Image: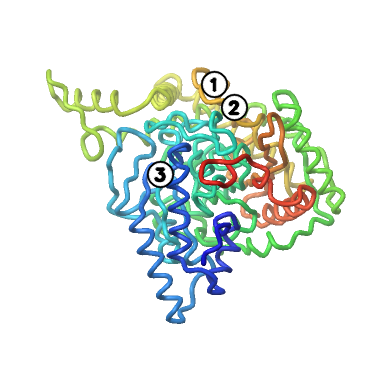
């Protein structure tokens, strides 16, 4: 009989149970589908659940395993995919009405890899529309709720993936991170989120928001699980012109090393003071103390141009988004609104974009179009790119002194739904610590640092040089083990209860 706690185990432990014959992929996938049915009406983490497809994929893996075929380490472990990643035969909306009902005719490269490795895809997770948001409140299909407290946000833009993993609806999920959309949801839901080095995971099949910033990555409950999933989805792809030719790193081996003796960890002075909640800072400091006792060296580092990263990001990102979203015009695919009077091509485009895009998407398109317009390009977009170069230089100088950098992931714990939705500046400030890594293309990881205000989780972020993702898994795996020893188990075990009988 299937153990009822199996969905609470890590993905690695679930994979081990499959390998040992303790359960089948069909049973495991059914258990997660039952969990989704029990709790997702309250969370809205999923926009689409592909029950039959997932069970068919699971049965195929079981048959291959029974036949003695050598399978991927994660074969048979189910996964959820953020709805900005195209999936053949499954709706992909990017959280927008303008793509409602669109079923792609092809798979993203990373989805091809998931299918080839035998991971049943449970469905598509909710997100801020076109990944524009920090709370998953701008989704055209309603907000996702935080499994720790359904009155709170799960972070954004990938709140659906983080909530699904945190609520035991899926052991693994795919997210995308343009300015923190994997790491910030991880921090406020008590999960682990990784933004790989830019170009190390193919962007082919990701619906682009900002092409020079977007990066897909893992959303999991443990550092080892993220490492295993990262190894699966990484690698060169000739269909992505920005894809790196590098071999895939030994991420899981680094996560299991759990040794930080002699590791130099730089604390970014500009990302720990004003604006960061006291209890978030306290959990951050306690985490560093644990690492220092384990043999790491803590060094204070200044990155003076990080102060300007947020402003530069909110010029570069909307500029690229305004260009990327021009294709959604009602002419080729997706929503088409035909006005009764004068249904010319121009008026169809106006009506379609007016009805299909939400307010936040329109705001960013307008910002980006203005920043790229004649007479303003150099003053705005050009200046922002110069700041981007300064941020990259700050990273380069810092990594001459230390092996990794550290900061709190988000300034606060999860705030209440509706609390900041009408204040764009306050909303944008949630990404103040995560944005620099996207501007520089460096990798980052967020993992739980403990409970802060109102008994809600806080996160700690580590950043490494480009192409040095293994360092994130080394320090993250070590800290995770140290903190779980102190807590007496995973942080999610301290979460309240959801309907269906497992931790929120």
| x then y, percent, for residue 145 | 51, 34
| x then y, percent, for residue 116 | 41, 66
Secondary element at tag 2? loop
**Residues under numbered marks 2 and 3 in contact, where contact means CB atoms less than 8 Å apart:** no
Return the residue nearer the eye: 250 or 189: 189
Return the residue nearer the eye: 396 or 129: 129
In the picture as drawn, the residue positioned furthest to the front comes out as 1
The label nearer to you, 2 versus 1, is: 2
Residue at left offset 46%, top offset 41%: 45
Residue labelled with disc 3: 83
Return the residue nearer the eye: 303 or 429: 429
Secondary element at tag 1? loop
Residue 41's image quarter? top left
Residue labelled with disc 2: 415
Neighbours of disc 2 within 10 Å: few (<14), some (14-19), many (20+)? some
**Residues under numbered marks 2 and 1 in contact, where contact means CB atoms less than 8 Å apart:** yes
Alpha carbon distance from label 1 to label 3: 24 Å
Residue 360's image quarter? top left
Q: Vertical placement of 30 versus 143: above or below?
A: below
Residue at left offset 59%, top offset 48%: 194
Q: Who comes first in sequence, dot 2 or dot 1?
A: 2
User: Would residue 479 be found to the left or right of residue 49 on screen?
Assistant: right
User: Would residue 468 be found to the left or right of residue 146 on screen?
Assistant: right
Alpha carbon distance from label 2 to label 1: 8 Å
Q: Quadrant of the C terminus?
A: top right
| x then y, percent, for residue 31 | 47, 57
Residue at left offset 47%, top offset 65%: 76
Q: Vertical placement of 349 versus 196: above or below?
A: above
Q: Vertical placement of 6 versus 22: above or below?
A: above
Residue labelled with disc 1: 420
Alpha carbon distance from label 2 to label 3: 23 Å
């Amino acid at each position: 009989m299937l153990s009822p706690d199996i969905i609470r185990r890590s993905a690695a432990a679930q994979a081990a149970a499959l390998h040992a014959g303790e359960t089948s992929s069909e049973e495991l996938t059914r258990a997660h589908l039952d969990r989704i049915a029990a709790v997702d009406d309250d969370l809205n983490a999923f926009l689409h659940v592909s029950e039959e497809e997932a069970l068919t994929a699971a049965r195929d893996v079981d048959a291959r395993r029974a036949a003695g075929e050598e399978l991927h380490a994660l074969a048979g472990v189910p996964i959820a995919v953020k709805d900005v990643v195209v999936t053949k035969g499954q709706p992909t909306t990017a959280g927008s009405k303008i793509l409602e009902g669109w079923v792609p005719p092809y798979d993203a490269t990373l989805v091809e890899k998931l299918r080839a490795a035998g991971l049943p895809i449970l469905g598509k997770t909710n997100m801020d529309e076109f990944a524009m948001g920090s709370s998953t409140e701008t989704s055209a299909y309603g907000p996702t709720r935080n499994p720790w407290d359904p009155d709170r946000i799960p972070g954004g833009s990938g709140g659906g993936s983080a909530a699904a993993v945190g609520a035991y609806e899926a052991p693994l999920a795919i997210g995308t991170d343009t300015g923190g959309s994997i790491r910030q949801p991880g921090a406020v839901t008590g999960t682990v989120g990784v933004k790989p080095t830019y170009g190390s995971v193919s962007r082919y099949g990701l619906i682009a928001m900002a092409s020079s910033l977007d990066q897909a990555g893992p959303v999991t409950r443990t550092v080892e699980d993220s490492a295993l999933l990262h190894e699966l989805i990484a690698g060169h792809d000739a269909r992505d012109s920005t894809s790196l030719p590098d071999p895939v790193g030994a991420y899981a081996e680094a996560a299991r090393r759990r040794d930080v003796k002699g590791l130099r960890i730089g604390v970014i002075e500009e990302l720990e003071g004003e604006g960061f909640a006291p209890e978030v800072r306290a959990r951050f400091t306690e985490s560093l103390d644990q690492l220092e006792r384990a043999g790491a060296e803590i060094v204070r580092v200044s990155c003076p141009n990080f102060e300007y990263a947020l402003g530069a990001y909110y010029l570069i990102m909307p500029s690229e988004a305004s260009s990327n979203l021009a294709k959604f015009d009602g002419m080729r695919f997706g929503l088409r609104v035909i006005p009764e009077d004068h249904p010319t091509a121009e008026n169809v485009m106006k009506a379609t974009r007016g009805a299909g895009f939400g307010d936040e998407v329109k705001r960013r398109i307008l910002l980006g179009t203005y920043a790229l317009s004649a007479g303003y390009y150099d003053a705005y977009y050009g200046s922002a790119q110069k700041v981007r170069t300064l941020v990259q230089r700050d990273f380069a100088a810092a990594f001459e002194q230390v092996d990794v950098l550290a900061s709190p992931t988000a300034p606060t714990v999860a705030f209440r739904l509706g609390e900041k939705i009408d204040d764009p500046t306050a909303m944008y400030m949630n990404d103040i610590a995560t944005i620099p890594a996207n501007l520089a293309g460096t990798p980052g990881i967020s993992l739980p640092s403990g409970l802060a205000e109102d008994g809600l989780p806080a996160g700690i972020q580590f950043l490494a040089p480009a192409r040095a993702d293994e360092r994130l898994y080394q320090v993250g795996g070590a800290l995770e083990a140290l903190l779980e020893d102190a807590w007496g188990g995973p942080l999610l075990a301290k979460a309240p209860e959801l309907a269906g009988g497992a931790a929120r």
